Amino acid sequence: MRLLGRILLAAIIGTAVGFAVVNRQPIDLDLGAWRITVPLYLLLIATLTLGLLIGWTVGWFGAARYRHRARLEARRARAAEERLAVLERQHAASPTGREALVSSRLPPHLDDE
């Protein structure tokens, strides 16, 4: 899997370099108060990067409720494990050592004696 990722990264870098070499012509960019001249490839790569950052940010905020719920469930699981550990220690420390956590006696309405 790591090899596939490196091959994909090399392909993306090769494509970006090829794109940059082909699109070197300068573009005048008018931003109202500023007018700058940048190569076309730089403008397109900056636009793509900005779009990716915006998309990742929106996705991250969109998944916030799921991350929050996962944290709450993890806390609940830890609390349950701690309660279980306390009960197991109490059970091990009981006088008989094998005392049942649930009574073996029948409820009064089922007891025929």
Image (cartoon, rainbow, N blue to C red):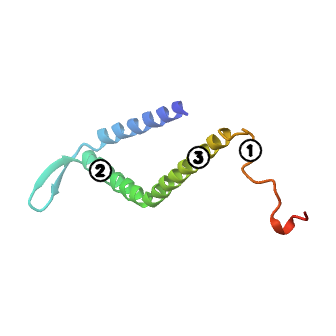
Q: Position of residue 27 (x, y in %)?
A: 19, 51
How many angstroms separate mark 3 from mark 1 (CA)?
21 Å
Residue 101 lies left or right of residue 58; in this view the side is right
How many angstroms separate mark 3 from mark 2 (CA)?
53 Å
Reading the image, the residue beneath label 3 is: 81
Q: Residue at x 42, y 57 (%)?
A: 59
Looking at the image, which is closer to me, 102 or 43? Answer: 102
Q: Position of residue 97 (x, y in %)?
A: 72, 38
Residues tagged 3 and 1 counted as in contact (Cβ below 8 A): no
The mark found on residue 99 in the picture is 1
Select label 3 or label 1 by which is in front: 1
Q: Residue at x 48, y 37 (%)?
A: 8
Select label 3 or label 2 by which is in front: 3
User: Which is more N-terminal, label 2 or label 3?
Assistant: 2
Residue 9 lies left or right of residue 21; in this view the side is right
Circle 3 Cα neighbour tier, 10 Å, few/some/many (<14 / 14–19 / ≥20) = few
Residue sitting farthest toward the right: 112
Q: Residue at x 63, y 43 (%)?
A: 90
Q: Residue at x 13, y 51 (%)?
A: 36
Task: For the N terminus, give its image quadrant.
Answer: top right
Q: Amino acid at mark 2?
A: Leu
User: Which is more N-terminal, label 1 or label 3?
Assistant: 3
Reading the image, the residue beneath label 2 is: 44
Q: Position of residue 86 (x, y in %)?
A: 59, 44
Q: Secondary structure at mark 2?
A: helix
Q: Amino acid at mark 3?
A: Glu
Q: Position of residue 44 (x, y in %)?
A: 29, 50
